[in-house]
Image (cartoon, helix red, strand yellow):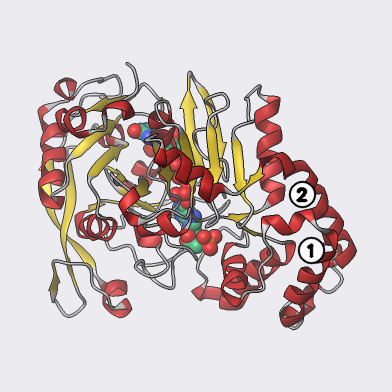
């Protein structure tokens, strides 16, 4: 399982694509098109929002699980683009039980943010929160409903009824017309028909045959609805436990949980960020790391590596391994800081992640300063090609978190990756791609 260990955008897409080579199936289990996963292969860039990051292998089984919220417009656009670029998408399967994002969910997302004003969450405005809210309220519309006009229409009416007041400002919006929504969504149903399936039994069959299944998380642990920086979180659970619910497998089916983290921190949207760098250095990291959102193009906030939050993420996920990405971005810094505890407003020291919102909002990082390195490391292909200080930085991380680093990434390209000794030893043999 691949999960984000920070606030998202850690490089899950790149790592999933790498491991997918040897996998029999790749499955997305939560989130929706709030995600933006980037893959760079032979200088060509791919950005996926809903498509599992295994789709570039011709015919590979790629599953959008029941836990995902699906905007069928975005999904059909991604399919069109892939076909246009010559990719075989026949392996895509979409759970018939996955919930749909409807036009009114996007309107409600916009309206919710406008209402919050200065307190806004900074959502991606893709309708994610309102779609999950309808799912929990049991008035959600599912992928299977796209295949039956009568049912679809009835469910849209039922879903719109309790929202009449909130949607009043959009009353004249043509996107809210019952007949046109129904027709638009029935057309998506016809387009997606060949991909709609019972994906739970599909995954069971692969596991029963001892095949390798990769679960591809979206977002990251600190954006988790229950365990993240609520209310500045997403509306699903990006942690490992959710993969079971979002795909239909039991916890004992999971052998490995790999947390992906950057060598520093970023966050997009509002909410507490104890190691944030607002000044020149923050801007430098943003420019060097290309820290602009894959989905919304917004600037990502940047900061030092937060080991308090990372240790919390490791525990929440039962992480068996760490993958460190974007180590190359830190090259050329004389000194690099890592946060090992927080200090609260009243001077109190926190060694573990504080549960209380007020404490977290006023916490600032306490740091250990490590020596940097000046060499460009983007061409390094094995650990021993890294400068000693870069290796010392990784060792410090690993020892603090207590989870072995198995893979190191030094650039967006697929080849800009190296396995550590621990990785070569512990990674399930078949997961390691050919050189
Ligand atoms: P995801 O949402 O976790 O899949 O991550 P994103 O794709 O949103 O953001 C990660 C960005 O960093 C993408 O633009 C990647 O191409 C890029 N990237 C991934 N790994 C590395 C790395 O090791 N070094 C550098 N410089 N860029 C990387
Ligand atoms: P990937 O999978 C980074 C953030 C939004 C906002 C909060 C809630 O690419 O790592 P939402 O639209 O989900 O209701 O917004 O969550 N957010 C992400 N940040 N990476 C993501 O996905 C994100 N998906 C949502 O910026 O702060
Ligand atoms: Mg992303």
SS type, badge 1: helix
Q: Quadrant of residue 47?
A: top right
Q: Please indicate, yes or no, whether residue 242 appears anywhere in the rendered image.
A: yes
Residue at image coords 17%, 25%: 383
From the image, tell me which residue sits under label 2: 189
Chain-order first, disc 1 or disc 2: 1
Q: Can you say which quadrant of the picture contains the N terminus?
A: top left
Q: Nearer the viewer, residue 227 or 25?
A: 25
Q: Left or right of 201: which side holds 16?
A: left
Q: Relative to 353, is 288 above or below?
A: above
Q: Quadrant of residue 382?
A: top left
Point out residue 346 in the picture as x, y percentages from the top left corner: 17, 80
Ligand 2 neighbours mark 2 (CB distance < 8 Å): no
Point out residue 80 in the picture as x, y percentages from the top left corner: 71, 34
Q: Please indicate, yes or no, whether residue 278 appears anywhere in the rendered image.
A: no
Point out residue 329 in the picture as x, y percentages from the top left corner: 31, 35
Disc 1 crowd, CA 10 A, few/some/many (<14, 14-19, 20+) = many
Point out residue 283 in the picture as x, y percentages from the top left corner: 38, 46
SS type, badge 2: helix
Q: Relative to 49, is 243 above or below?
A: below
Q: CA distance from mark 1 to mark 2?
A: 11 Å
Q: Can you say which quadrant of the picture contains the C terminus?
A: top left
From the image, tell me which residue sits under label 1: 152
């Amino acid at each position: 399982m691949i999960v984000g260990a920070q606030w998202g955008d850690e490089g899950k897409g790149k790592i999933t694509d790498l491991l997918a080579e040897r996998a029999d199936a790749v499955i997305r289990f939560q989130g929706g098109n709030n995600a933006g996963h980037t893959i760079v292969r032979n200088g060509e860039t791919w950005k996926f929002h809903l498509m599992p990051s295994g789709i570039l292998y011709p015919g590979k089984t790629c599953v959008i699980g029941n836990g995902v919220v699906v905007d069928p417009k975005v999904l059909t656009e991604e399919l069109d683009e892939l076909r246009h670029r010559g990719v075989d998408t026949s392996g895509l399967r979409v759970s018939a039980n996955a919930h749909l994002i409807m036009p009114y969910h996007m309107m409600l997302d916009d309206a919710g943010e406008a209402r919050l004003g200065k307190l806004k969450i900074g959502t991606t405005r893709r309708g994610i929160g309102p779609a999950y809210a309808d799912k929990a309220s049991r008035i959600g519309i599912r992928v299977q409903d796209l295949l039956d006009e009568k049912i679809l229409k009835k469910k849209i009416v039922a879903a719109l009824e309790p929202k009449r007041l909130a949607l009043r400002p959009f009353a004249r919006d043509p996107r809210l017309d019952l007949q046109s929504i129904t027709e638009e969504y029935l057309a998506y149903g016809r387009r997606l028909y060949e991909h709609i399936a019972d994906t739970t039994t599909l995954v069971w069959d692969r596991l029963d045959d001892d095949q390798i299944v990769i679960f591809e998380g979206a977002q990251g642990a600190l954006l988790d609805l229950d365990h993240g920086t609520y209310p500045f979180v997403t509306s699903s659970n990006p942690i490992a436990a959710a993969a079971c619910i979002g795909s239909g497998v039991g916890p004992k089916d999971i052998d490995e949980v790999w947390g992906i983290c950057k060598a520093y921190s970023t966050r997009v949207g509002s909410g507490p960020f104890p190691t944030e760098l607002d000044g020149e250095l923050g801007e430098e990291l943003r420019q060097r790391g290309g820290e602009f959102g894959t989905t919304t193009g917004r600037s990502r906030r940047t900061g030092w590596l937060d080991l308090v939050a990372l240790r919390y993420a490791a525990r929440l996920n039962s992480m068996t391994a760490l993958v460190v990405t974007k180590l190359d971005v830190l090259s050329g810094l004389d000194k690099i800081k890592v946060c090992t505890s927080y200090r609260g407003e009243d001077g109190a020291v926190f060694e573990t992640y504080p549960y209380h919102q007020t404490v977290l909002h006023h916490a600032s990082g306490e740091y250990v300063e490590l020596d940097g390195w000046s060499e460009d490391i983007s061409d390094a292909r094995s650990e021993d090609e890294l400068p000693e200080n870069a290796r010392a930085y990784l060792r410090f991380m690993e020892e603090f978190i207590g989870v072995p680093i198995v893979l190191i990434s030094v650039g967006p390209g697929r080849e800009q990756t190296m396995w550590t000794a621990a990785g070569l030893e512990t990674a399930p043999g078949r997961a390691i791609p050919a050189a």
